[in-house]
Amino acid sequence: MPDSAQKPSTTADHTPPLAMPKRYGIGLNVALQIFLALALFAGINRLNWRHYWRWDLSPSQDYTLSPATLNTLSSLSRDVQINILFGRDSKVYGEVQSLLEEYRMHGRQRIKVRSIDPVRDIERAEQLKADTGLSLAQSGVLIRCGVNKRFITEEELVIREAGTSTNKQIIEFRGEDAISSAIISVVEGRVKRFYYIVGKGSRSDAALSDAYNAALDLGKQQNFDVIQANLSEISNIPTDADGLLILGARYDLSEREIKMLDDYWRTKRAGVFIMLDPGGETNRLNSFLNANGVRPRGDRVLTAESTSTGARKEFTVLAEFMKDVTFIRHLGSSAMTLSGQSESLELREQDTALKEQSIIVEPLIRASPRFWGERQFLEELPVVDEEDTLPPIYLAASVERGAVNDESQRADSSRMVVVSNSTLLDKQTMLAVNRDFVAAGLNWLMNRESNIGITSKPKRSYRIQLSRRQHELIFWVTSITLPGIVLGLGFMVWASRRAG
C-alpha cells in the first residue's frame, strides 16, 4: 500500500497576506513620529541654550573680555542699561555690537543692551533724548544706571593714525576700556576729579598742550574730570581732589606750595602723578620726593659708543616694566620707549625710617642693561666712570603711604607715581603702551584696581594673495565640481526611485 504520508498534499499552505493598516493608524503613527521629533528638537535646543561653549577664533582675540572687565561684571550690584546709538553703516558698529553682546552674556542679567539706529528708529531715538536730556548728535554708546548716565562718543572708542589728514584710519579699538570705565563710573555715582597743576612751565607750549590734552583724553576714557589749578592762586588743595597731576614742570614749587602738597599727601586718601623734567629746576619738589623714598639723581640715562662714522650717543631709552607690581602686571610682556631725556631714580626700598612711616616704594620701569646714568652727558662720547650710575637703572616708581597688609584697608592709603621723563604723553612720540601705563597708574591712584588691565585691540588688515592657478582651481571646484556632485546625487536618487 502506498504510504499516505508520502502522498503529495493537494492543498497548498498559503499564509494569508497581512492586512494593510487603516488610514487612521497611519495618521496616528505619523503624528507620533512628528511629536517625538519636535520633542527631541525642543529638548536639544533647550540644552543648547542653557549649556553651551563659545570660542573666540579671531587672531587678536577681539571678542574676548579681559579679566578686569569680567571681575567688574561679576561684582555688579545694580542693573545697567546700554543703548547702542549707531547707524548700520558705521565702520565700528559691528565691533561695538559684538563687544556689548559679550557684556550682556557675562553680566549675570544685570546688563541690558538695546540697539537704536538714529536714522531709521527716529521715534525711539527721540524718546531716548527726552528721557536723558542728551542731544545725541553723534554716534556712540549711552550707559545708564539709575539717574547716572554716561555717553561715549564714537571717537572715544577708537584710536586713529597720526597726521593731519581728514580721513585718518582707525588703528586701534579701545571700546572695552571706555565701556568698562563708564560702567564703573555710573555704578559709583560720582565722577572722580584730578587737578592738573599749571603755572610751572614746560619744555615748550606744544609739550604743555600735549600733556594736558592727553590727560583730558584719559579722563574721557577712564571717566574722571581734569581741572586746571594754579597753586599760587589757591590756599590749599581742594577737598574733592582724587588726585594731582604734575606733568613736566619746568620751574620749582614755592615753600608754601610744597607745604600744600605735603599736607595733601599726608591726608587719609591722596593721589599724585608726577612726570619729572630732567632739565627743570625743581629742587624743592625733588626734596619732597626724596623724603618719600625716591631721589632724582640729576644725571641722564643714555648709551654711547664709538662707531665708524663717529661718536654715537643715544638718549631714547628702551625700557621694560617690572613684572611683580600688581597694577602693571598686564604690561609685563611689553617693551617701552622713552624719548627725550630721562634721569635715573634712586629708590630707598629698604629704608627703616620709611617703613616706620608705613611708606612702601616699588620700582615700575627699568632701563635696558645697556643704558647707564651719566653725569657728564654733554660730552661728545661719555664713558662710564665712578660718579655714574650703573644698571639697574630705574625710570619710574610707585610710593604708597599708610599701606597695610589687610587688602580691605588699603583703599585708605595715599599713593604716588613718579616718572623721570617728561615726554611720556607727547603727541608725536606717545605709544599705546605709554598711554596704558599712565591709565593703569591713574586707576591705581583712584583705587580702581578692578579697571586695570584693559588694553586697546589693534586693528589689522589681512590680505590673501592667490596665484592664477589657485584662482582657476577655486573656479572649477565651486562652479563645476560641487554643482556636478549635487546634480549626480540627484540623478542617482531619481534613478533608484524609477527602478523601485
Image (cartoon, rainbow, N blue to C red):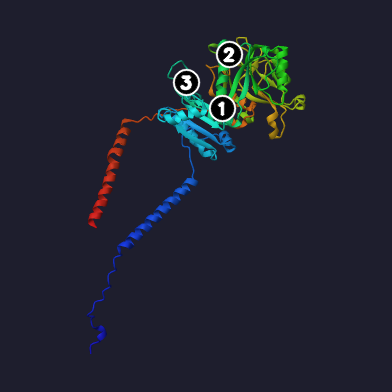
Residue 235: x %, y % from top left: 70, 15
Residue 196: x %, y % from top left: 62, 17
Task: Give amino acid for label 3.
Answer: Glu
Q: Earlier in the sequence, mark 3 or mark 1?
A: 3
Query: Does residue 288 appear left or right of residue 191 in this picture?
Result: right
Residue 314: x %, y % from top left: 58, 15
Q: Secondary structure at mark 3?
A: loop
Crowd class of label 1 (few under 14; some 14 to 19; many from 20; radius 10 Å):
few
As drawn, the label of residue 161 is 3
Q: Nearer the viewer, mark 2 or mark 1?
A: 2
Task: Give amino acid for label 1.
Answer: Ser
Q: Residue at x 63, y 11 (%)?
A: 199
The answer to the question of whether label 3 and label 2 lie on touching residues, with beta carbons closer than 8 A, is: no
Quarter location, residue 261: top right
In the image, residue 57 sits, relative to residue 432, either above or below, namely: below
Q: Which residue is mark 2?
A: 208
The answer to the question of whether label 3 and label 1 lie on touching residues, with beta carbons closer than 8 A, is: no
Q: Distance from label 3 to label 1 (Cα)?
A: 20 Å
Quarter location, residue 29: bottom left
Q: Earlier in the sequence, mark 3 or mark 2?
A: 3
Task: Give amino acid for label 2.
Answer: Leu
As drawn, the label of residue 299 is none
Q: Secondary structure at mark 2?
A: helix
The answer to the question of whether label 2 and label 1 lie on touching residues, with beta carbons closer than 8 A, is: no
- Front residue of 277/220: it is 220
Q: Distance from label 2 to label 1 (Cα)?
A: 27 Å
Q: Which residue is mark 1?
A: 334
